[in-house]
Structures are given as structure tokens and as C-alpha cells.
Image: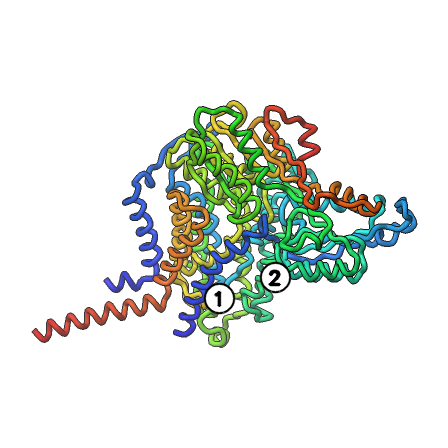
């Protein structure tokens, strides 16, 4: 019993089940999934669960990078929302060329994605240099891009609004004809599989945790902490680019000031909900990813029940605070001690009898 | 152990920060972008006017313009472009610009303009309060202040004119248009902007009043998407998933209307002129008006960013020794109907 409870992944899974149970009790239609067609005549699945896996995808992808950054540097990157704006703006710029309303794409989508990816990774590398070489607190270092990022994104497209009419570009944030499951979910799953293979077959996981736990002892053991920290920021940059592709594809356009707004907070929350210490060190990737879907489930649930607009952030905050406290390592330690004491007490009683 | 406690406190603080951000962002009408006080005296403009300007007095009129960041929204971009076009050297002006979304930075810019000895100070304030002392300084220095876009909490004697949009009227125009559609029943999905912003209050107010007054008007869902297209998409998706019937989408800006339409398309619900769902947006972005022209949307309400011609008239009047009879000038704002909009409207009013 206490073994299950001690397992880090227990917390986000329990939170997810709890939210699901709440929905099951209040309104079982939450779990209804129906098959329909969209306006283009393609089959699509719809329902709350589909909405969750669809809209939670970007967050899950970002949670991967954020977990690594948190583990290695003991801090968080708060510029991911702004970096998504930059990467998305870059992709649209490459796709559109000089014309903001192209009838045909000037470059293949794949090329645009690669360019966006390189730009996002370059900004990630910039953050990484500030953190690893100049030893600036990650939150302070990324504050620079957080402040300037959206203006840079607007500048990339001369503050104009590119709109892409080619339906193919919409596949990444919507549905591929003939496949009723939303594409973002496939993209997220691909990212999850890649990161698990990387963690399994390389030393990335071990090294990031070693650096996060004790930088100088990992250096003495032959790991280069500067490089590892820098690398995690570059990986987060790649995650940002993938999330940006989905985001701009959803509407085939961009709004520099609101795209992916506050998503950095949700990504950090996903890491915290996964029971990972925000001060770095050991991490559990699966727990973070499930944490991301917990946040999306919460958002979708709040949208479903007509929570008044002005009260929505308060409701979200209350649930999130409760979840974060429950998933905090200190709290779990205290509880498992408590459980042990009770058990110990019982055993003594038995012995006395 | 200490580290872990710290981490937990940080996480909690972050959550609180999340909500705090939500409400703090409210007064700044649209979403905040980066702040930067940018000096744009346009070197050639500053040098040239004396020689070239055909101003009657022979001397260029010096104006200091304090605005919000043009990257903030499409509205602001159009607004800034319009101001730059009007207050040019060719029109006999010597204009300096300062941009910030922060009140204190704007006040500092105003103080600098006063020291520079501008003739007019044009101001779109980030925040409504805190302007009294600096405006008094301007008055003492003989500088006329003209407010545009946003009003402030200060004595009206401190400024010469205030040129603003009437958000309540924008909402009323839209609701009157909707009432004119003579539907048997109105089941409205109401997607709101950032709660507490002037645009949200004005545009929500008229609809709320109408729904309260009429028996056949119902709100199916009222939720804030915080000007964000994706949130709007999720909100409409949520109504579709629940299977609740609706026939009107009242989105308080174009982006959110766009997100709502994306959800409708995914569920194959027809929208636009003569279709199942009426789509309404605000702000008159060019792409939105094109949606109207293509009959995919039904209505778009204007929020006029073109104050410069009004300001120009005020300055000309003051220059010729005239007085401004009514200090608060409310701009004309239109509402476009998809069945009557023309390409000329799109070109002229699209921002």
C-alpha cells in the first residue's frame, strides 16, 4: 500500500482519476465519444475526452522539455510562451514568403518546421548559455525572452497577420483526412516515445539528475554540467518548436500577443503536479506528462460546468494548489511517515494483546 | 528538506501568480506584449520640417505622442500607423513618439516631452490614475493635453479634449442588429474578453441587459476566453460536446470569433448568412471583414482606431484660437452586416 503511495507517478494518476470520478458522478456524458464528420467531409471523433487529448498535446510536449530543464538547472524556463510565438511566427514567415495571404505555400511545410525548430533551439541555446555559463538564475535569465519574445515574433512578420489558406497546413493542429483521431495527439505521442527511447538508451536521464543533485560531484565524476544544462535548454527549444507548429496550425494564423499565453505556467505546473522537485535533481518524465493531461482535464471540466467567467481563475487556482501540495515531495514524505506510524502502532497493539 | 519546502512554496506562489496575472492584466485592454519606451523622433522628420513644411505659420507644430505598444494588438498597430501618417512633417507637425504599456514609464515620457517644450501632448494612458501632477505640470508649461482612446481619472480642466470609443454603444449596436434578425429564439454562446476591461464591460453589458429583458433570449454559455482564439475554440467545443443547441455566437473580438468558427467547422455546423449559426465579432480586422464578405460570418462591430483626424481637427481649432465646446468626443463606429458589406468597406475600415 505505502509502496504504491510512495511511487511518484501515483499522484498525477490519482489526480486524473479523481477528476474523472468527479465528472462520472456529476455527468456521465463526459465520457461519451461520438463519430461525426467535419465541414471538409472527413470523419472525426468528438467528445470531452477527445478534446482533452487534443488540447493537452502541446502542454505534454512542453512538459517533456520543462522536466529536463527543471531537473538539470533547478529552475524553470518562463519564456516558452514567447518562444512559441517566435517559432510560430518564423514558420509562417517561411511558409508565406513576402505575401501574407498566399494561395500556395512558398516552401514545403517540412522546411518551415525545420527553420522554426532551428530558431527555437537557438533561443533555447541563448537561455542555456545564460544559465549554464553565466550562472544566472533560470527564471531571471528567461525573463529576458519572456519580456521581449512577443515583440520579436511580431517583428519577424512586420507586425502583419499571415493567414494560410492551404488546408494541408491545418492537418497538424486538426485532423488528417480519413483519420478520426486529432493529429496533435499523434505528435505528442511521437514526442513521448522519442524521449523515452532517449532516456532508455542514452545517459541523458542519469546525467541531468546527477547535475541537478550535485553539480560539483558530477563534475568530479567526469560529467560536464555546463554542457548538460545547456543541452536541456536546447531540447526544450525543440519541444517549443513542435508545440508552436501545432498552435499555428490550429487556426492557420497567429496572434502575437495571445498565442500560447501563460502556457509556461501550465508547463511548470505539469512538472510540479508530477511530483518533481522544482529545485532540481531526480525526475519522473511519465509523471510530468500525465500532469499535463491533468491540467487539460481540469480546464475542460471547468469549461463544461458553467463556472462564472470572473470566478474561473479562482476555481482553477484552488484545485491546482490542492494538487500541488499533495504532490509535493515533503507532503508525501510526511504522509508516508504518518501511514508508517499508524501501521507501527497497530503492530504494537497486536503484540500487546 | 529546506529546498523541497522552498520548491513547494514557489509552486504555490506560482499558482497564485497565475490568478494574480489574470486580474492584473484586466485593465490593460488587450493582452500585454513587451514594453519598450521607444523614441521615434524619425531623424529626417525632425530636421526637415522647417525647410519643407507648408504650415501656415512657417513653424511646425510640436506634438509629443504617448501610446501603448503597437505590438499589443491589431487595433494598436492600426492606431499607431494612423497617427504616424497624420502627424507627419508634410502636414506641418514635428511629432515625437513614446510607447509603453506601463503607467510609470508613460508618465516619465510625458515629463520628458514637457521639458522638450512640445505644443501638444497626446496621450493614450495605460492606466486611468496617477496623471494629475504631470498634467498640471503640462498646464503650467502652457501645453495642451489631448486624450485619445482611453480616458483618465483626472479633472477635465487638465485636458483640452478626450477622443474615445463608446464601448457601451458598440455593444448596443451589435445587440440591436441581432434583435433585427427576428429569430424565433436566441440561444447565444457568449465569449467574453478579459474580464473587467472596458471593451468586455461595454460589449457584455448590452447583451446581458437584452437577455434579462426578453423571454426568448437565452445564454447557452457565458465564458471568458481572454481574447484568445484557442480558448474560444475550446469553449464552443465544450457546448458542442454537451449537445446543447445554440444558434448565435457573440464573440467580443475577431480572434475569439475565429476560434469559435474553427470549432463549428470541426463539428460540421454551418455558419454565416442564412445558415444554422450566426457569428458575430468585433474590431473589424481586415481578415474578419473578408470572412463577412465571403458570408461565413454575419456581423462585425467596429472599434475605431482612427482618432488622428479628430485630434487634427481639435489642434487646428485650438491653433486658430477657437475653443472646444464638448470635451469628450465620441467617434463614429459602425457595425457591418455580411449581407450589405462591400469590398470598399473592407479596404477602408479593415485594420
Q: Nearer the viewer, residue B320 or B23?
A: B320
How was the colour assigned to the protein in this rendering? Answer: rainbow
Question: Residue A144: which numbered mark, if any?
Answer: 2
Q: For the view shown, which residue lies furthest in the top direction?
A: B274
Check residue B77 in the rendering and tell me which mark sits there, or answer none. none
Of the two numbered discs 1 and 2 on the same chain, state the one appearing first in sequence: 1
Q: Give the spatial CA distance, label 1 vs label 2.
A: 20 Å
Disc tally is 2
Q: Position of residue A349 (x, y in %)?
A: 12, 73
Look at the picture and state if B317 lies above or below B132. above
Determine whether label 1 and label 2 are within 8 Å by CB: no
Secondary structure of the residue carrying numbered label 1: helix
Which residue has dot 1 on it?
A72
Name the residue: 55% across, 42% down: B202
- Point out residue B208 in the picture as x, y percentages from the top left corner: 48, 38
Residue A47 lies in what quarter of the image?
A: top left
Quadrant location of the N terminus of chain A?
bottom left
The residue positioned 39% from the left and 48% from the top of the image is: A297
Say which residue appears at 75% left-offset and 62% top-offset: B112
Q: Secondary structure at mark 2?
A: helix
Relative to residue A19, is residue A100 depicted above or below?
Answer: above
Q: Which chain is disc 2 placed on?
A: A
Q: Is residue A164 visible?
A: yes
Q: Quadrant of the C terminus of chain A?
A: bottom left
Residue B104 in the image, given as x and y percentages of width and height: 65, 61
Tag nearer the camera, 1 or 2: 2
Amino acid at each position: 500500500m505505502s509502496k504504491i503511495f510512495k511511487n511518484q507517478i501515483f499522484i498525477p494518476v490519482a489526480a486524473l482519476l479523481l477528476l474523472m470520478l468527479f465528472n462520472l458522478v456529476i455527468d456521465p456524458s463526459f465520457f461519451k465519444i461520438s463519430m461525426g464528420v467535419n465541414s471538409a467531409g472527413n470523419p472525426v471523433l468528438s467528445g470531452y475526452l477527445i478534446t482533452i487529448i487534443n488540447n493537452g498535446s502541446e502542454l505534454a510536449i512542453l512538459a517533456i522539455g520543462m522536466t529536463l530543464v527543471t531537473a538539470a538547472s533547478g529552475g524553470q524556463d518562463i519564456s516558452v510562451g514567447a518562444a512559441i510565438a517566435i517559432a510560430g511566427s518564423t514558420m509562417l514567415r517561411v511558409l508565406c514568403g513576402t505575401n501574407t495571404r498566399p494561395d500556395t505555400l512558398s516552401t514545403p511545410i517540412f522546411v518551415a518546421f525545420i527553420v522554426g525548430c532551428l530558431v527555437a533551439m537557438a533561443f533555447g541555446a541563448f537561455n542555456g548559455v545564460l544559465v549554464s555559463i553565466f550562472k544566472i538564475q533560470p527564471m531571471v535569465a528567461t525573463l529576458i525572452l519572456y519580456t521581449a519574445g512577443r515583440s520579436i515574433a511580431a517583428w519577424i512578420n512586420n507586425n502583419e497577420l499571415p493567414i494560410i489558406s492551404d488546408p494541408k497546413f491545418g492537418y497538424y493542429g486538426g485532423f488528417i483526412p480519413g483519420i478520426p483521431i486529432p493529429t496533435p495527439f499523434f505528435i505528442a505521442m511521437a514526442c513521448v516515445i522519442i524521449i523515452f527511447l532517449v532516456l532508455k538508451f542514452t545517459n541523458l536521464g542519469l546525467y541531468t539528475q546527477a547535475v541537478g543533485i550535485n553539480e560539483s560531484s558530477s563534475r568530479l565524476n567526469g560529467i560536464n554540467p555546463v554542457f548538460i544544462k545547456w543541452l536541456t535548454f536546447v531540447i526544450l527549444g525543440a519541444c517549443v518548436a513542435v508545440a508552436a507548429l501545432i498552435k499555428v496550425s490550429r487556426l492557420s494564423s497567429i496572434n502575437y500577443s495571445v498565442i500560447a499565453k501563460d502556457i509556461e505556467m501550465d508547463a511548470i505546473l505539469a512538472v510540479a503536479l508530477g511530483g518533481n522537485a522544482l529545485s532540481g535533481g531526480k525526475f519522473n518524465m511519465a509523471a510530468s506528462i500525465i500532469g499535463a493531461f491533468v491540467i487539460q482535464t481540469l480546464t475542460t471540466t471547468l469549461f463544461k460546468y458553467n463556472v462564472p467567467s470572473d470566478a474561473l481563475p479562482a476555481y482553477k487556482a484552488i484545485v491546482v494548489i490542492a494538487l500541488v501540495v499533495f504532490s509535493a515531495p515533503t507532503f508525501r514524505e510526511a504522509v508516508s511517515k504518518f501511514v508508517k506510524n499508524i501501521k507501527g502502532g497497530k503492530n504494537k497493539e497486536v503484540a500487546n494483546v | 528538506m529546506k529546498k523541497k519546502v522552498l520548491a513547494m512554496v514557489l509552486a504555490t506562489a506560482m499558482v497564485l501568480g497565475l490568478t494574480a496575472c489574470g486580474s492584473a492584466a484586466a485593465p490593460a485592454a488587450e493582452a500585454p506584449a513587451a514594453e519598450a519606451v521607444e523614441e521615434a523622433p524619425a531623424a529626417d522628420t525632425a530636421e526637415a520640417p522647417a525647410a519643407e513644411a507648408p504650415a501656415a505659420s512657417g513653424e511646425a507644430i510640436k506634438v509629443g505622442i504617448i501610446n501603448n505598444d503597437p505590438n499589443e494588438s491589431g487595433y494598436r498597430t492600426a492606431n499607431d500607423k494612423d497617427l504616424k501618417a497624420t502627424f507627419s512633417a508634410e502636414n506641418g507637425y514635428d511629432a515625437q513618439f513614446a510607447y509603453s504599456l506601463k503607467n510609470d514609464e508613460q508618465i516619465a515620457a510625458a515629463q520628458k516631452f514637457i521639458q522638450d517644450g512640445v505644443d501638444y501632448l497626446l496621450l493614450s494612458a495605460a492606466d486611468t490614475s496617477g496623471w494629475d501632477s504631470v498634467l498640471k505640470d503640462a498646464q503650467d508649461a502652457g501645453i495642451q493635453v489631448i486624450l485619445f482612446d482611453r480616458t483618465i481619472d483626472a479633472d477635465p480642466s487638465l485636458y483640452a479634449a478626450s477622443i474615445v470609443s463608446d464601448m457601451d454603444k458598440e455593444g448596443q449596436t451589435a445587440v440591436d442588429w441581432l434583435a433585427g434578425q427576428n429569430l424565433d429564439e436566441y440561444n447565444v454562446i457568449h465569449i467574453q474578453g478579459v474580464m473587467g476591461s472596458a471593451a468586455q464591460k461595454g460589449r457584455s453589458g448590452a447583451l446581458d441587459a437584452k437577455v434579462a429583458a426578453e423571454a426568448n433570449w437565452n445564454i447557452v454559455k457565458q465564458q471568458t476566453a481572454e481574447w484568445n482564439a484557442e480558448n474560444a475554440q475550446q469553449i464552443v467545443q465544450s457546448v458542442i460536446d454537451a449537445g446543447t443547441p445554440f444558434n448565435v455566437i457573440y464573440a467580443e473580438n475577431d480572434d475569439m470569433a475565429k476560434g469559435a468558427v474553427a470549432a463549428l467547422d470541426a463539428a460540421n455546423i454551418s455558419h454565416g448568412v442564412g445558415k444554422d449559426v450566426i457569428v458575430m465579432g468585433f474590431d473589424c480586422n481586415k481578415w474578419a471583414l473578408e470572412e463577412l464578405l465571403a458570408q461565413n460570418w454575419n456581423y462585425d462591430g467596429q472599434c475605431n482606431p482612427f482618432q488622428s483626424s479628430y485630434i487634427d481637427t481639435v489642434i487646428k481649432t485650438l491653433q486658430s484660437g477657437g475653443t472646444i465646446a464638448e470635451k469628450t468626443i465620441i467617434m463614429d463606429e459602425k457595425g457591418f452586416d455580411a449581407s450589405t458589406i462591400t469590398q470598399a468597406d473592407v479596404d477602408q475600415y479593415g485594420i
